[in-house]
Amino acid sequence: MTARPPFAALRGKTPEDCFGRLATPCYILDEAALRQNGEILKGVADRTGARLLLAQKAFSNYDCYPALAPYLAGTEASGLFEARLGKESLPEKEVHVFCGAYRDDEFDELLRYADHIVFNSPAQLAKFGPRAKAAGKSLGLRINPECSTQEGHAIYDPCAPGSRLGTTRAQWDARMTPDLVALLDGLHFHTLCEQDSDALEITLDAVGSKFGDVLGRMQWLNMGGGHHVTRPDYDVPRLERCIRFAQETWGVTVYLEPGEAWALNAGFLASRVLDLTENGGTRNAILDCSAACHMPDVIEMPYMPPVFRAAEGSGDDNSNVYRLGGPSCLSGDVIGDYEFDHALQIGELILFGDLAIYSTCKNNTFNGMPLPNIWYRRADGSLEQLTDFGYRDFKYRLGRAVD
């Protein structure tokens, strides 16, 4: 796999040059990098006729949506609030929604925002489908092709044994009546996570084997997300062959709903070293940012985000290997061991790359940790502050909002 270029958006400058005046920790979202990703994705749409959506679960910083608007067909939401955000922020675009189970007390409001609604099970389709159809919505059912291509990320594998996500062929045969099938306009599958198009090709073969007879009666097929299209070594021609195969074989409109690909390598988290300690040969750098609070996927996935002028640390006695961790009380609030090309200093700026995705939409205030502010780096290099978080934001997540 070709190394990602997480710091290409710095355009040859140092983090201190670009962001040294900003109070840390803070996120920086890069307009030029977002547009570059958009150009790549729109190229796929233009060449194939596929319709590409932004999965807001990965990136929902709506101030940046105007930069992506020329490239996308719409947004994908996981529930009511994301659907409303998509409709309000991009009113001229499509809004697609998938949720593991919909709430009765929210569904009528959801119908105000959504254009396509995908159900997870025949029971949900039976309960809400007639109401959605009467409102003029396009309906889909999420299928589970029972084809796992994941390695090492079981938490993100919708095809794992016992998965609650998607309808298997056995469930379809047992529960999908002719009346329910008649409600459907399309099928949806989502099985990938940060993968290349070879995994999609394998999955699409399984989809055809198990649901090909059904797809011929559908208007559209949504191939979900997890397609790392904007990664430098991604096999775009193979992706386009998969899209054309579906179009030609089943006569469907193809949707893709990547999340990461739109904002891959388009953001940073800037932090500073608060203290340097040592324990049994392990050199610890305590930062003002937290894995648990500000980049929770580091712990959940787990993974190590790239760091400017550093690589994953080795187990030798190199004096420039540091274990980067947060200031919280959680012993496991550790980002990872990194080998720097220099000795760290207290107060030094540490820049993490590829943190536009799954960061601002997942962060939290555990330990009373302040939310990092969000900055937007415009294409001309100017910086715009988007947020002004403080004590109020911490307090009012916990109780009555009284000034």
Image (cartoon, grey):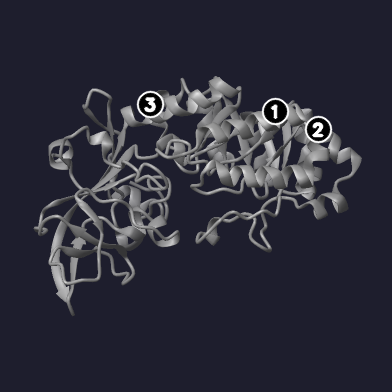
Would you place residue 46 above or below residue 228 in this image? above
Name the residue type under label 1.
Gln
Residue nearest the observer in this picture, 211 or 363: 211
Residue at the bottom extreme, as displayed: 280
Would you place residue 400 above or below residue 79 in this image? below
Q: Earlier in the sequence, mark 1 or mark 3?
A: 3
Tell me the residue at 34%/48% (across/down).
Answer: 393
- State if disc 3 and disc 1 touch (CB < 8 Å): no
Q: Is residue 217 left or right of residue 273?
A: right
Q: Earlier in the sequence, mark 2 or mark 3?
A: 3
Q: Residues within 10 Å of mark 3 (few under 14, many from 20)?
A: many
Mark yes or no: residue 83 visible: no
Point out residue 265 in the picture as x, y percentages from the top left corner.
35, 40
**Secondary structure state at the residue bearing disc 2:** loop
Name the residue type under label 3.
Arg
- How far is the residue under mark 2 from the one under mark 3? 36 Å
Q: Is residue 1 left or right of residue 333?
A: right
Q: Which residue is mark 2?
A: 216
Classify residue 49 by image quadrant: top right
**Secondary structure state at the residue bearing disc 1:** helix
Q: Which mark is residue 35?
A: 3
Tell me the residue at 27%/26% (across/down).
Answer: 378
Residue nearest the observer in this picture, 53 or 364: 53
Name the residue type under label 2.
Gly
- How far is the residue under mark 1 from the one under mark 2? 10 Å
Residue nearest the observer in this picture, 227 or 15: 227
Q: Which residue is mark 1?
A: 247
Mark yes or no: residue 285 visible: yes
Would you place residue 390 above or below residue 287 in this image? above
Q: Is residue 155 left or right of residue 218?
A: left
